Every structure is written in C-alpha cells, then in structure tokens.
Image: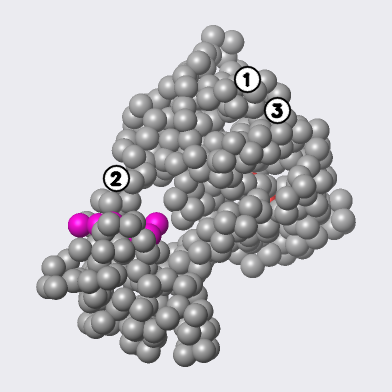
C-alpha cells in the first residue's frame, strides 16, 4: 500500500455511506470513520467533513406521488439536514458545526473570505465543521451539484493538504469492477490526463449525484493546487485502520506541488494586485522575522482601491515585502490604520478579523 502523511484533511462522505438505504441517515458505516476522526484529532490533525445525506434523510418525510420536483427535493433537504447533522453529532463529544455552501458563495470574493475565516475559527475552537451544499437555496445554476466537487472546493478554501473521498468502492479501477471481473485497482495516479478520465465512465449509485467522474474532477482540482487526493472504500472498517497507520487502502492521486508552493504561485502570479499597504518597521519585522499576521496598528499608508478579499502588496521603505489578501476594503482600512485591533469594532461597527492580512493568506517576497 502507498503511504501518505497529512495535517489538515477534508473527508467527503457520500450518500452510499451515510444513507445506505436511501431514505434515512444511518450510523451503520460511520463508526470506524468516526473513530478515525476522533483519533486523528487527538493526534493534533485537523479534519473537515463534507457530508451528503440531507435529501435522503428528509425523503420519507415528504410524500411525493411520482418523481420528486426540485422544490420537493429542496424540502427534503431542509427537513433532512438537521437529521443528518444529528446523525453525526451522536458519534462525538465535541461540537459539530453546520456549514452550508453554494457555488455562488465560493465565487463571491467577500463570501469566500468569510467562509475561509469561519472554517478557520471553527477549527480553532476544536469543533468539527460538517459542510454540505445549501440545497434549499441552490437551483442548478447556483449549485456545485455534487459533493465530490464540493469536497474539492472545501479543501481549497480551507487550505487543506489532503482530500479523502469515502465511497462504496475500493478506488479507481482499470475497468468498472461491477461489470468486468478482470478489473484491477489502480493504487497510485501521478498525473490525471484523458486516459484517467476515460476510466471513470458514468455515474455510480443512483443515490448520490456523483460517480467516478466527479471524483476524478475533484482529484484534478485538488492535485493541481498541491492537495493530494484519496479515494477509499468507507464501508470497510479496515480502511480507517490503514489510514490511521498512514497507509492508503485505495487510490492515491499525488499532488503536483506542495500546497505552500501552489499558494505562492496563486498569490504571486495569478492574483491581480488591487492595492498597496505601507507598513512601519515594527510590522515588517513581525511579518518577516516572526511569521506574524499584519495588524492594523502597523499600517501607515494605503493606495489603490480594493475590496475585501482582494490581493494587496505590503510595502516597507519602498520595497514590496509580501503579498496577501486584505480582510478589509480600502475605505475601512483607512479608518482603522494605525489603530489597535481591539478598536476595530468601535470604529467600523463590525470586525471581520483582528488582523488586516492573515498569515495563511500571505506570501513573503
Ligand atoms: N447535497 C446532497 C445531499 O445532502 C448530496 C449531493 C451528493 O451526494 O453529491 O443530499
């Protein structure tokens, strides 16, 4: 078996695991996974769950004659979402935190930053974030559509190093193992190209929206951003014993780079600089020597017109020392520059964060 190491993982749990009978959530396949989550957290690792199951959990509560309409499915999701959350909570002594997202939230800069901050804060407080698509508001064009890709977006926004997709099959095979007895498991994929997509075929179970194809799409998004991706069989208890030992009992898609270098590339080259923030010598030393975040107290001058979540250059003595995402827009930053973090709320009437640019969203240049 291949080995892997990780620090922050997103674990995607599909309907086949949490709602194996299709009409309610069950704990049948979750016990070993829950033990894995608890043991990993005790070992100092961080986990975010992306869970399906709301539609299945609400299915029996919404009587429909024929095929369910979109609104009927949305009603199922609304009724089922808290049943799904309750199904998770009974496995843990620590709190589970419900996070509902749509594709639109991930595209919108301000909301993206807020999602990132919220996930960071939930993890800081040792709760377990459980993410699902906000099915009640999202019609097709607003949707991510399947939780495999939602898992990938969550891994990106949470700056995870690993995405673990728990399915009801052992991994990626050379052919569909349900149809072809000669199909063998592919333990490792170093490059996702057309030949890999060709192996994926169509959708899998009728319950979830994804099949192997959406899993490959998710792996593609993640590995190109430095996030390794695993497809494992979550129905087998031994899967999680192996994962705890750092072994991959399924398919490992290697990351093309490290998350840090992918982030550096993205921040330095992909993101357009929308403004410049000048900082004093104390702030420069804190950033460069201590690996600190940028506080409003160190900001001396602001240029450009940027919105919350835009990329800005951080300047000291005429030299660009860093680039990062500003948690405040230009107008509000002008009001809090030079002030103490504790005064942000009284000056602005709100506080996004105590820092102007968080360390996680910054590269030193
Ligand atoms: N959001 C859907 C649900 O919770 C699941 C989508 C999927 O499994 O891909 O029921």
Mark 2, other Cα within 10 Å: few <14 / some 14–19 / many ≥20: some
Q: Position of residue 196 (x, y in %)?
A: 40, 28
Q: Residue at x 80, y 38 (%)?
A: 27
Along the viewing direction, whichever of 75 and 82 lies nearer the viewer: 82
Q: Position of residue 71 (x, y in %)?
A: 72, 64
Mark 3 → mark 1, Cα distance in angstroms: 16 Å
Which dot, 1 or 2, sits closer to the camera? 2
Q: Residue at x 66, y 34 (%)?
A: 39
Residue 228's label in the rendered image is none
Q: Return the disc, 1 or 2, that comes first in the chain's sequence.
A: 1
Residue 320 falls within the magenta-colored stretch: no
The yes-or-no answer for disc 1 within 8 Å of ligand 1 is no
Along the viewing direction, whichever of 154 and 323 lies nearer the viewer: 323
Q: Which region is colored magenta?
A: 359-365
**Kind of element beneath mark 1:** loop
Residue 178's label in the rendered image is 1
Marks 1/2 in contact by CB < 8 Å: the verdict is no
In this rendering, is residue 47 above or below 212? below
Residue positioned most to the top: 182
Which dot, 3 or 1, sits closer to the camera? 3
Mark 3 → mark 2, Cα distance in angstroms: 34 Å
Q: Residue at x 36, y 79 (%)?
A: 297
In this rendering, is residue 299 above or below 142? below
Q: Position of residue 53 (x, y in %)?
A: 72, 47
**Kind of element beneath mark 2:** helix
**Kind of element beneath mark 3:** loop
Mark 1 → mark 2, Cα distance in angstroms: 39 Å
Q: Which residue is mark 3?
A: 235
Q: Return the disc, 3 or 2, that comes first in the chain's sequence.
A: 3
Q: Which residue is mark 2?
A: 261
Q: Is residue 12 left or right of residue 4?
A: right
């Amino acid at each position: 078996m291949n080995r892997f190491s990780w620090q922050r993982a997103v674990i995607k749990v599909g309907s086949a695991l949490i709602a194996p009978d299709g009409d309610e959530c069950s704990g049948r396949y979750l016990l070993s996974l829950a033990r894995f989550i608890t043991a990993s957290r005790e070992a100092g690792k961080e986990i975010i769950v992306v869970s399906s199951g709301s539609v299945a959990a609400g299915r029996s509560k919404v009587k429909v004659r024929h095929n369910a309409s979109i609104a009927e499915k949305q009603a199922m999701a609304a009724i089922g979402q808290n049943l799904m959350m309750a199904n998770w909570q009974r496995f843990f002594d620590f709190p589970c935190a419900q996070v509902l997202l749509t594709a639109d939230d991930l595209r919108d800069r301000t909301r993206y930053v807020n999602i990132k901050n919220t996930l960071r804060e939930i993890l800081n407080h040792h709760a377990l974030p459980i993410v699902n698509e906000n099915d009640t508001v999202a019609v097709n064009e607003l949707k991510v559509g399947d939780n495999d890709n939602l898992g990938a977006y969550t891994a990106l926004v949470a700056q995870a190093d690993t995405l673990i997709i728990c399915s009801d099959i052992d991994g990626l095979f050379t052919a569909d193992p349900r149809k072809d007895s000669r199909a063998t498991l592919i333990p490792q994929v170093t490059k996702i190209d057309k030949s890999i997509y060709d192996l994926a075929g169509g959708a899998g179970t009728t319950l979830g929206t994804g099949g192997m194809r959406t899993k490959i799409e998710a792996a593609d998004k993640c590995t190109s951003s430095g996030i390794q991706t695993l497809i494992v069989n979550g129905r087998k208890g031994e899967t999680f014993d192996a994962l705890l030992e750092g072994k991959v009992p399924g398919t490992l898609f290697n990351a093309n780079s490290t998350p840090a270098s992918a982030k550096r590339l993205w921040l330095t080259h992909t993101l357009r600089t929308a403004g410049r923030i000048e900082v004093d010598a104390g702030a420069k030393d804190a950033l460069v020597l201590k690996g600190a975040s940028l506080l409003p107290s160190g900001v001396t001058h602001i240029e450009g017109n940027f919105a919350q979540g835009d990329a800005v250059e951080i300047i000291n003595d005429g030299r660009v020392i860093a680039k990062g995402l500003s948690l405040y827009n230009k107008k509000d930053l002008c009001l809090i520059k030079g002030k103490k973090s504790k005064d942000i709320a009284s000056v602005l009437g709100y506080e996004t964060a105590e820092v102007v640019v968080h360390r996680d969203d910054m590269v030193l240049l």
